[in-house]
Image: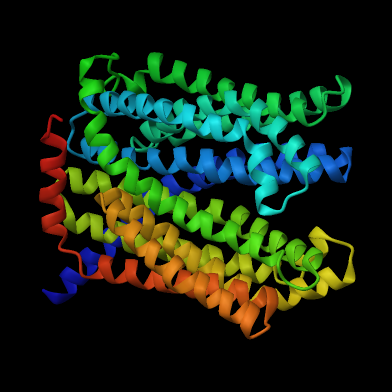
């Protein structure tokens, strides 16, 4: 009897492993392709001179922090609502929830635009060069169309993601990246538009992605059951969406902002050019790698929310273990293969290469903890725990991570290593707390909550 039960559990685990892999692999590709849009823009303008590169790098960082990350975080509320509704076979609600999310995100865009328009007034306050601030502001203004496009694109991707319709997003993201690369090169170099050309290209590429996915949502037979027309129900659902979207955004942005504060703090160290360069490279590596576990986090969110909505709490728990097992293997392989080439890939300066080699063990540790928290955050979104995740991130990074980093970096004179160790400490606290919550979760109770959430009208 025990042997039969063990085989059944093993078979369920393998089955769930296949399901998560089927979702995660293309989702990782989608994440990487979408991230590369900004990378291509920065690479293009990097050939226009140090001033342009510096201003675009700063503008990209600030627009991500104040705009794109905010929208992405808020859209995470759909992973709970749409995922659980799909699992409960309340298919029409997916379309209604998606329209509620689009309206909500569009309402957030105007205040963000005001901040971007006055960026040249704000940057000098934190010590940035006025000329760089002016160029950064120009780039940010031309990114405003991309912001509004993202307010529609991010709910669209969550709508498809929660139905496991990943292949259309992968093909669209690949086509958009190819279009963006050609258009960006043409506008920047052939039409001599410089950094403004890169921003225009990014906006047009974002809206192309919106158009194609919007057409797919409207006319594909795969979306026939979940399509809904824009109606009064979408407006009535704004309150329910915001209750999940706001803590979801806080959960995402608190971590993101702490990383940006780390990079800004490195400019206060002795030899700020070296410290800032190395920490920026480490942050770039960490962010690029994060697109991989983010894909697995999305897969985890899909499986958990679908299974809870369907009233299968045991399957949801298996989904968590499956996602984490796959991610652990991929992270280990990635770290092993890239351990000797990180510095060479980013700089010819021997001092920078040596410093990156010194930082690599700490970078690897942060990547491992990031991988765990990406999957666990996906579980949190799938269950509707965004408010818990927000409190955990606040405590982990602002009560532990940043203070520890400041003490080690400035008081203990560990410089950039100390700052990064602080972030690692915060990530460890975050992953530990999320793990404990997942381990001690009453999944039967979560399934009941999911059913109640899906059946609520407002």
Q: Is residue 87 above or below residue 9?
A: above
* Residue 42 at least partly seen: yes
Q: Residue at x 54, y 29 (%)?
A: 113
Percent coordinates x, y for residue 199 in the rendering: 70, 29
Name the quadrant of the N terminus: bottom left
Residue 244 is drawn in which quadrant? top left
Percent coordinates x, y for residue 56 in the rendering: 74, 40
Residue 134 is drawn in which quadrant? top right
Front one among 95 and 105: 105
Q: Is residue 254 above or below residue 133?
A: below
Q: Is residue 377 left or right of residue 135?
A: left
Percent coordinates x, y for residue 131 in the rendering: 80, 40
Percent coordinates x, y for residue 277 in the rendering: 77, 61
Q: Residue at x 55, y 24 (%)?
A: 209
Q: Is residue 136 above or below residue 390?
A: above
Q: Residue at x 70, y 25 (%)?
A: 201
Q: Is residue 185 left or right of residue 329?
A: right
Q: Residue at x 67, y 56 (%)?
A: 284
* Residue 20 at least partly seen: no
């Amino acid at each position: 009897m025990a042997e039969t039960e063990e085989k059944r559990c093993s078979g369920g685990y393998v089955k769930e492993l296949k399901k998560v892999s089927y979702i995660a692999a293309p989702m990782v590709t989608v994440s990487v392709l979408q991230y590369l849009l900004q990378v291509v823009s920065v690479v293009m303008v990097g050939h226009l001179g140090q001033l342009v590169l510096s201003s675009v790098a700063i503008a990209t960082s600030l627009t991500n922090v104040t705009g794109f990350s905010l929208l992405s975080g808020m859209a995470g509320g759909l992973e709970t609502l749409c995922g659980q509704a799909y699992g409960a076979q309340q298919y029409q609600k997916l379309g209604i929830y998606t329209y509620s999310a689009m309206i909500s995100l569009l309402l957030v865009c105007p205040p963000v635009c005001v901040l971007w328009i006055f960026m040249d007034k704000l940057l000098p306050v934190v010590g940035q060069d006025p000329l760089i601030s002016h160029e950064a502001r120009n780039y940010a203004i031309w990114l405003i169309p991309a912001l509004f496009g993202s307010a529609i694109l991010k709910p669209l991707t969550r709508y498809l993601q929660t139905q496991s319709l990943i292949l259309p997003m992968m093909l669209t993201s690949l086509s958009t990246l190819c279009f963006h690369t050609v258009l960006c090169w043409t506008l920047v170099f052939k039409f001599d538009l410089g950094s403004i050309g890169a921003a225009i290209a990014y906006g047009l590429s974002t809206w192309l992605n919106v158009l194609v996915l919007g057409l797919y949502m409207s006319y594909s037979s795969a979306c026939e059951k979940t399509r809904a027309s824009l109606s009064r129900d979408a407006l009535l659902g704004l309150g329910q969406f915001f209750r999940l979207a706001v803590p979801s955004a806080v959960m995402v942005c608190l971590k993101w902002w702490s990383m940006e504060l780390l990079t800004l703090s490195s400019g206060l160290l002795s030899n700020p050019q070296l410290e800032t360069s190395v920490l920026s490279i480490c942050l770039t590596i960490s962010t690029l790698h994060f697109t991989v576990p983010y894909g697995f986090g999305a897969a985890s969110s899909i499986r958990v929310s679908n299974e809870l909505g369907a009233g299968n709490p045991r399957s949801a728990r298996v989904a968590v273990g499956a996602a984490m097992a796959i991610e652990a293997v991929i992270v280990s392989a990635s770290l092993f293969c890239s351990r000797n080439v990180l510095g060479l890939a980013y700089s010819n300066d021997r001092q920078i290469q040596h410093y990156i080699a010194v930082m690599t063990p700490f970078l690897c540790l942060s990547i491992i903890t990031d991988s765990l928290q990406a999957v666990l955050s996906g579980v949190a979104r799938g269950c509707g725990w965004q408010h818990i995740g927000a409190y955990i991130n606040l405590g982990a990074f602002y009560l532990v991570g940043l203070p520890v980093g400041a003490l080690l970096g400035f008081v203990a004179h560990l410089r950039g290593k100390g700052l990064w160790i602080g972030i690692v400490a915060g990530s460890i606290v975050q992953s530990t707390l999320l793990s404990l919550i997942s381990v001690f979760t009453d999944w039967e109770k979560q399934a009941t909550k999911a059913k109640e959430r899906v059946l609520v009208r407002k």
